[in-house]
Amino acid sequence: MTSPRLRIAVQSKGRLAEGGMDLLKRCGLRFAYGRDKLHQRAENMPVDLMLVRDDDIPNFVASGACDYGIVGENVLREEQAAGGRARELDVALRLGFAGCTLKLAAAQGGEIRSSADLAGKAVATSYPALTAQYLRERGIEAEIVEMRGSVEVAPRLRIADAICDLVSSGATLQANGLAAFETVLESEAVLIRRSAGRDPQTDAVANVLMRRAEGVIASSQTKYIMLNAPKDRLEAIRAPLPGADAPTIAQVAGRDDVVAMHAVCRERVFWETLEALEAEGARAILVLPIEKMLA
């Protein structure tokens, strides 16, 4: 009897598609590319990808058409706020890419400076259910104007008094004379699944992938630092290392007063960090990327 294959829904194009495919490949999956643009089959694991629209992914997973899905958390929360099957989904793993923020924004220097100022006003958004839920939880009654795109022009065209939209850098808001004043949701790519009723066999495959993915995510946020340090300055040199576990200390050939220090740093390493290490007496400092990691 053939074992069932794990079906993962992935966005067919865009930032999430690129990030999702890159993550899966770094987890060791090799895909056979054919003419079918909606389906890709892994050659080395029982995994199939379904390439679909991002806002369809929660429904694909909730209905059982797919076992797992890679989607923006903003899409998941919007579908859950709207009700229906998406409420049966949960986040299996946060994936650490495609970060963005859903924010409320209004005209710069205007009278709207907080969500409380939206009472009786109109708010344009591509996330009507999530926006309405956010305002309702705060006891604010406002008109929700649903738009499919170009939300940021709504105040200028007097379609709405404020907007609720995704913000990455804030440049689009600034270009349209808007300023963000409140965060509705911090979003990133997430791996979703049904809360119950999953197949144990496909779940076992998913657990292997998730452990690998955790290692990939951890390694992308981790650096390996190598340096030489005077023995009498070891504690002072350890102090600036960001998020480091206990370092490995080794003797340097031909030197009794100097040791080699190797450390895995689980936070970002900036030039200021290296300068602080050098100021404490560290020399020959190397910062290396980590490709894969199992904690």
Image (cartoon, grey):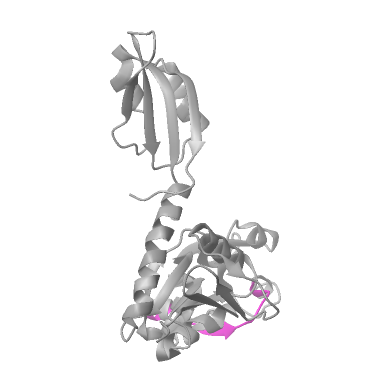
Please, which residue is most extreme toward the front here?
Answer: 1
Is 136 one of the magenta-colored residues? yes
User: Can you give x and y, in whole percent of width and height, for residue 249 in the image?
Assistant: 32, 24
Is 182 one of the magenta-colored residues? no
Q: Quadrant of residue 11?
A: bottom right
Looking at the picture, tell me which residue is in the foreground, 119 or 65.
65
Tell me if residue 98 can be seen: no
In the image, residue 266 sits, relative to residue 152, either above or below, namely above
The total number of labels drawn is 0
Residue displayed at 34% across by 83% down: 198
Tell me if residue 280 can be seen: yes
Residue displayed at 65% across by 80% down: 159
Q: Quadrant of residue 215?
A: bottom left
Task: Name the side, left or right, on which 31 lies relative to 131.
Answer: right
User: Can you give x and y, in whole percent of width and height, for residue 152 in the image?
Assistant: 65, 70
User: Can you give x and y, in whole percent of width and height, for residue 116 in the image?
Assistant: 43, 71
In the image, residue 18 sits, relative to residue 146, either above or below, namely above
Residue displayed at 43% across by 84% down: 2
Q: Quadrant of residue 164?
A: bottom right
Looking at the picture, tell me which residue is in the foreground, 24 or 230.
24
Residue displayed at 43% across by 27% down: 226
In the image, residue 255 sits, relative to residue 15, either above or below, namely above
In the image, residue 279 sits, relative to residue 130, either above or below, namely above
User: Can you give x and y, in whole percent of width and height, for residue 201 in the image?
Assistant: 35, 79
Stretch in magenta: 135-151
Query: From the image, which quarter does the N terminus lie in?
Result: bottom left
